Image: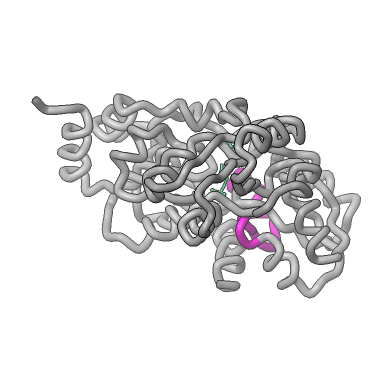
Amino acid sequence: MTTIADKIRQVAGKRKAIILAHNYQPPEIQALADMCGDSLELSRRASRTDAEVIVFCGVHFMAETASILSPEKTVLLPRMEAGCQMADMITAEALRIRLDTLPSMPVVTYVNSPAEVKALSTICCTSANVVQVAESLDADEMLMTPDRNLAMYAAARTGKKIHLWDGFCPTHERLKPKDVEAARRKHPDAVFMAHPECRPEILEIADVIASTSGMLRHAAQSDAREFIVGTETGLLYPLQKANPGKRFYPASEKMLCPNMKKISLEDVLNCLENMSNQVKVQENIRLPALEAVEKMVKLG
Ligand code: 13P
Ligand code: SF4
């Protein structure tokens, strides 16, 4: 019997398409994808392939980043309404207004942001390299957007004066110290890993602070057998798959990003059959946004 996954692979082959899935996507989407990973890693790897079409199973800013890095490829987002609540907490217009009060201030922008905001920024960062990016700037003061938790994390580690943007990820913000205490009582030998999008009081009690790819690396290399995972619960699937002998527990079942769960296998098939839901960043935005992304990539 032909399954929907078989049909998707057939159409993807005909279209010369590559299917990418973020680490938070539902298991059936990650199982289908040609590549899984964090958003920047996926866009960078896809730009190096000779695929003509990129199907990005993730959220809108990720498809935009793929378009910024691969303007010659067609980028499809299987559900257009899969946005990112944190990226929606900033606009180019709002950033311009804030910069009027902070003249000639360098701007560091998290990749979880709209392309127009990247285009106005000095440099981009990810949760994995934010400290390195802040240190690379020849300035002791900067504005960091849109995630205030990531900015506070970088400020504490660099000693630089970082002006905050009042944005956050609702999924990570939901995790409270009492949730971690309860998880630790249930699993006393587990290592608690937290994503830097979590509140400062969570990062203070974490054993390990890492991005999603950093958590995957840490879990594989560590001698520990049990882990409490302080990020979106979708990461449990790749963690468990890569480490069948180890145990992973969510820090809280409430850490669920509704946008990351919108895409179904039917949506992937539909957009590939109809070449619908194309995401394309216009050149006047793409070129300055690319400059901010490339400056970060050059740091290694
Ligand atoms: P990373 O995969 O870069 O750690 O990002 C986390 C996230 O919230 C993506 O939406
Ligand atoms: Fe955005 Fe948070 Fe969802 Fe990631 S988990 S897509 S940062 S809302």
Across and down, in percent, residue 142 comes to 82, 60
User: Residue 104's quadrant in the figure?
Assistant: bottom right
Of residue 6 and residue 59, the one placed in the foreground of this image is: 6
Where the C terminus falls, by quadrant?
A: bottom right
Across and down, in percent, residue 182 comes to 69, 31
Across and down, in percent, residue 243 comes to 40, 49
Q: Is residue 272 above or below residue 240?
A: above
Residue 225 seen in the current view: yes
- Tally of numbered tags: 0
Of residue 177 and residue 272, the one placed in the foreground of this image is: 177
Position of 281 with respect to 193 (left or right) is left
Residue 56 included in the magenta stretch of the image: no
* Residue occupying the point 27% across, 60% down: 50
Where the N terminus falls, by quadrant?
A: top left
* Residue occupying the point 72% across, 45% down: 147
* Residue occupying the point 37% across, 34% down: 27
Position of 118 with respect to 141 (left or right) is left
Position of 265 with respect to 181 (left or right) is left
* Residue occupying the point 72% across, 58% down: 108
What span is in magenta?
114-129
Of residue 216 and residue 262, the one placed in the foreground of this image is: 216
Residue 118 included in the magenta stretch of the image: yes
